Structure formats: C-alpha cells, structure tokens
Image: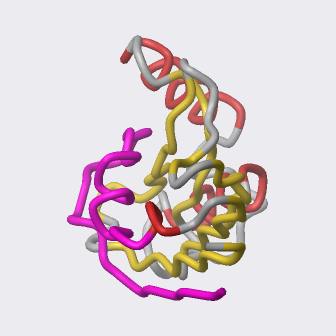
C-alpha cells in the first residue's frame, strides 16, 4: 500500500525546529500501516531535514551555532551571492544534512527512539513556508 501527501510547513525563522507533531498531523493514515516506511522529502535547497534530540531545546541551539561556525557567511570565494549572504551557506548546510529521511513504521506509528524527533533545519533568515512530500509505503 502506498500513500503520498504534499504539505507545507508554516514559515519559521532561521534555526533548527522540532516538527514531528506537525508532520504526524498531516499523516492520519499512518495508523493504518502495520509495517512500512515513511520517506520525508523537503522540496527546497536552502533548508534540510534531520533526526535528533527531541527533549532539550539547547541541542537545537547548539546545532545552529555549530553550523554557523562551520559554514560561514560572506566568504570571499562564494560566487553565488545574488540572493543574500545567507543563501550560499544555506545550500551548503542543506547538502551536509540532507533533504530526505527514511523512518520505519511499526504498528501504525513512527518507530523513532524515545529521544528522537524530526527537525526542520531552516538555513535562511527568511525562508518562508517549506513544502514536504511524505510517502508512506508498507502493509496494512
């Protein structure tokens, strides 16, 4: 059985945002699957997805600090600069983290670890609404 949904996330400021519950609200048919996979794909090159700590917000702050230090703005070797100083670093950060996730489904639920959640990694200062494609596949 296959199900696919395209939906938008509300605009968020630059940073790492826990979106697990927002994703789950968009997938009511998840509970129909006894076993399967969720592929979650973001349709943008300046934002990304990852899975990490879902309890302590300081982890998300540390992610932002690390990536801003590692992939700096205004580097003299950037040639893709027409869209602002945050744009090329956003593309690099997106490629480092990735644009899709594979999450197992077990007994109608995402089979994440107890301390894991899905992050939207917004790498632009004003990224706007972000579109996700969620593809569920498995057995009912």
Residue 112 versus residue 133: which sits nearer the camera? 112
Colour treatment of the image:
secondary structure
Residue found at x 48% / y 60%: 85
| Quadrant location, the N terminus | bottom right
Expressed as whole percent of the image width and height from the top left, the position of residue 22 reads: 29, 55
Part of the protein shown in magenta: 1-29
Q: Quadrant of residue 40?
A: bottom right
Vertical relation: 91 (above or below) 135: above
The answer to whether 127 appears left or right of 42 in the picture is: left
The answer to whether 16 appears left or right of 105 in the picture is: left
The answer to whether 105 appears left or right of 24 in the picture is: right
The answer to whether 110 appears left or right of 97 in the picture is: left
Quick check: is 20 in the magenta stretch?
Answer: yes
Expressed as whole percent of the image width and height from the top left, the position of residue 134 reads: 53, 76
Residue found at x 52% / y 81%: 133
Expressed as whole percent of the image width and height from the top left, the position of residue 106 reads: 65, 49
Residue found at x 37% / y 41%: 17
Quick check: is 118 in the magenta stretch?
Answer: no
Residue found at x 78% / y 51%: 96
| Number of numbered discs visible in the structure rendering | 0
Q: Quadrant of residue 81?
A: bottom right
Vertical relation: 17 (above or below) 23: above
Residue located farthest toward the left when viewing the structure as drawn: 10
Residue 81 versus residue 69: which sits nearer the camera? 69
């Amino acid at each position: 059985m296959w199900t696919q949904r395209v939906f938008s996330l509300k605009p968020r400021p630059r940073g790492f945002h826990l979106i697990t519950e927002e994703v789950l609200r968009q997938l009511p048919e998840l509970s129909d699957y006894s076993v399967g996979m969720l592929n979650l794909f973001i349709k943008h090159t300046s934002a990304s997805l990852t899975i990490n700590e879902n309890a302590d917000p300081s982890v998300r702050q540390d992610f932002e600090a690390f990536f801003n230090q590692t992939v700096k703005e205004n580097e003299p070797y950037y040639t893709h600069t027409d869209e602002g100083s945050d744009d090329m670093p956003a593309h690099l950060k997106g490629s480092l983290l990735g644009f899709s996730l594979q999450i197992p489904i077990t007994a109608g639920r995402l089979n994440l670890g107890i301390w894991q959640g899905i992050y939207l990694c917004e790498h632009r200062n004003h990224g706007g609404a972000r579109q996700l494609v969620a593809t569920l596949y498995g057995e009912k």
